[in-house]
C-alpha cells in the first residue's frame, strides 16, 4: 500500500483480491512390473476413485504411458506423491508418480 495517508485510506476501502492457489496434477506413470490390481488399489485408497474410474485410469496409464490421478494444491499433491511412492516401495513395486503444474 502507498505510504502517504491519502493512498493508504483508499487502499483500506478496497476489497483485497488474491489469486487462487496454483493447481497441481498428480500423474502416475506406466511401468512393466507393477501389478494392475496394485495400481487400481492405490487409485481407490489415495485418490478416492471408485473401482470403475480407478480401473479406467489404470488402463489409460497402461496404454498411454501416463494419466492424471487428481488435481490438488501444492502441499496436498506433494503429500499424495510421497504416500504413493512409499506404498509402492513398501510393496517392492517400481510404480512412479509425479506432480506437475496443472
Ligand atoms: N503396465 C503394468 C502391467 O502390465 C500395469 C501398470 C499400470 C503399471 C499403471 C503402472 O501406473 C501403472 N502390469
Image (cartoon, rainbow, N blue to C red):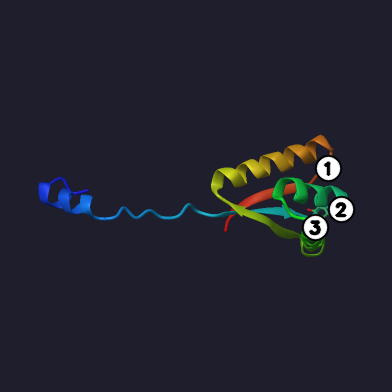
Left or right of 72? Residue 86 is right
Q: Earlier in the sequence, mark 1 or mark 2?
A: 2
Residue that extends furthest to the left in the rendered view of this protein: 5
Asked if the beta carbon under badge 2 is closer than 8 A to the nearest atom of ligand 1, the reply is yes
Q: Label 3: which residue?
A: 58
Q: Label 1: which residue?
A: 93
Examine the image and state in which quarter residue 61 appears: bottom right
Asked if the beta carbon under badge 3 is closer than 8 A to the nearest atom of ligand 1, the reply is yes
Give the number of callouts.
3
Q: Earlier in the sequence, mark 2 or mark 3?
A: 2
Mark 1 element type: loop
Location of ligand 1 given as a quarter of the image = bottom right
Of badges 1 and 2, the one in the foreground is: 2
Q: Residue at horizontal 21%, vertical 53%?
A: 13
Residue 5 at x, y percent in the picture: 11, 47
Quote the CA–CA distance across marks 2 and 3: 7 Å
How crowded pointer 2 is (Cα within 10 Å; few <14, some 14-19, many 20+) is rated as few
Quote the CA–CA distance across marks 3 and 1: 15 Å
Q: Which mark is residue 74?
A: none
Q: Label 2: which residue?
A: 36
Q: Residue at horizontal 17%, vertical 48%?
A: 8
Examine the image and state in which quarter residue 100 appears: bottom right
Residue 34 visible in image: no
Q: Earlier in the sequence, mark 3 or mark 1?
A: 3
Left or right of 31? Residue 4 is left
Residue 50 visible in image: yes
Residue 4 at x, y percent in the picture: 12, 47
Q: Residue at horizontal 79%, vertical 41%?
A: 88
Q: Are marks 2 and 3 in contact (CB under 8 Å)?
A: yes
Amino acid at each position: 500500500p502507498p505510504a502517504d495517508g491519502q493512498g493508504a485510506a483508499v487502499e483500506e476501502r478496497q476489497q483485497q483480491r488474491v489469486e487462487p492457489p496454483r493447481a497441481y496434477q498428480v500423474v502416475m506413470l506406466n511401468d512393466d512390473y507393477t501389478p494392475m490390481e496394485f495400481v487400481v488399489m492405490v487409485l481407490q485408497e489415495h485418490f478416492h476413485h471408485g473401482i470403475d474410474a480407478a480401473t479406467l485410469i489404470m488402463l489409460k496409464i497402461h496404454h498411454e504411458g501416463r494419466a492424471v490421478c487428481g488435481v490438488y494444491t501444492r502441499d496436498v499433491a506433494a503429500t499424495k506423491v510421497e504416500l504413493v511412492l512409499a506404498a509402492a516401495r513398501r510393496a517392492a513395486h517400481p510404480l512412479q508418480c509425479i506432480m506437475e503444474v496443472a
